[in-house]
Image (spheres, helix red, strand yellow):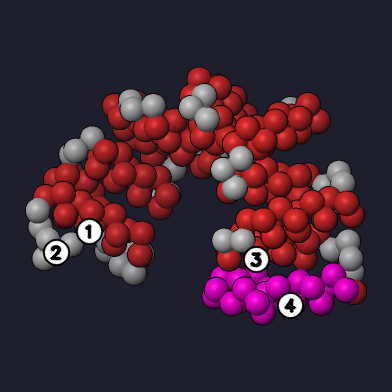
Amino acid sequence: LAAAYRGQGKFSKADELCASALATQPRHRGALLGRVDNALQLGDQAAALAHVEAALQILPHDRALLLKKGNVLQAMQRHGAATAHLEELRLRWPEDVLLMVQLAAAYRSQGEFSKADALCETALATQPEHRGALLGRVDNALQRGDQAAALAHVEAALQTLPDDRALLLKKGNVLLAMQRHDAAAAHLEGLRPRWPDDIPLMVQLAAAYRSQGEFSKA
């Protein structure tokens, strides 16, 4: 129920439920993570860090909480601290694909694209359909300014996951970054019948129209 309230943006109700659950079961992992997620979605990153550190006093070896701390540090723009934390976890879980993808994001935030790429490739060697690693390769290329590589990566990813909404939207982002505004608009218009109420899709399509000077459509 707390997750449902959080999904509706009712963070105070979600937090009350998590606190009530913890009063009964102080070691309940879902409630501990829920308090962190409530704070993150409220934009209160300091509270999120306080919650995750308190939770780790209770469950110090919990993988989900340790990974969540990495997320919180990233959200706080503490990229160096996030990288150091996640690298320490890799010693414990060297084959953990989710950890690799999260660490790749931390390296990407610091401009360490070769390290980020290597981690995504390693993750994909283990799980070729891992959406986060597929998206990570595209983001690595985009952020280092190699838009042709980004397009190649997203098209290859769509061979693996052809109906994945996040990858299809990412292709629109790549086409916009390449200044291929007509292609971006056509691609995104093709997605609208499938997801007519998708707000990120609407916003991205409006940006494509704006780039074409189609301000009334935007």
Residue to which mark 1 is pinned: 206
Q: Which of the two discs, 3 and 1, labels the residue nearer the N terminus?
A: 3
What crowding class fits label 2: few (fewer than 14 Cα within 10 Å), some (14-19), or many (20 or more)?
Answer: few
Instruction: Tell me, yes or no, whether the two marked residues, 3 and 1, touch with CB atoms within 8 Å.
Output: no
Residue 217: give x, y in percent of width and height. Answer: 14, 64
Q: Which of the two discs, 2 and 4, labels the residue nearer the N terminus?
A: 4
Please determine whether, in this image, residue 101 is positioned above or below residue 45.
Answer: above
Q: Amino acid at mark 3?
A: Asn
Please determine whether, in this image, residue 43 is positioned above or below residue 175.
Answer: below
Residue to which mark 2 is pinned: 217
The magenta stretch is 1-23
Instruction: Tell me, yes or no, whether the two marked residues, 4 and 1, touch with CB atoms within 8 Å.
Output: no
Mark 1 residue element: helix
Mark 2–mark 4 Cα distance, whole angstroms, equals: 43 Å
Q: For residue 16, which numbered disc appears in the image?
A: 4
Q: Amino acid at mark 1?
A: Ala
Instruction: Tell me, yes or no, whether the two marked residues, 2 and 4, touch with CB atoms within 8 Å.
Output: no
Mark 4–mark 1 Cα distance, whole angstroms, equals: 38 Å
Q: For residue 38, which numbered disc appears in the image?
A: 3
Q: Amino acid at mark 4?
A: Glu
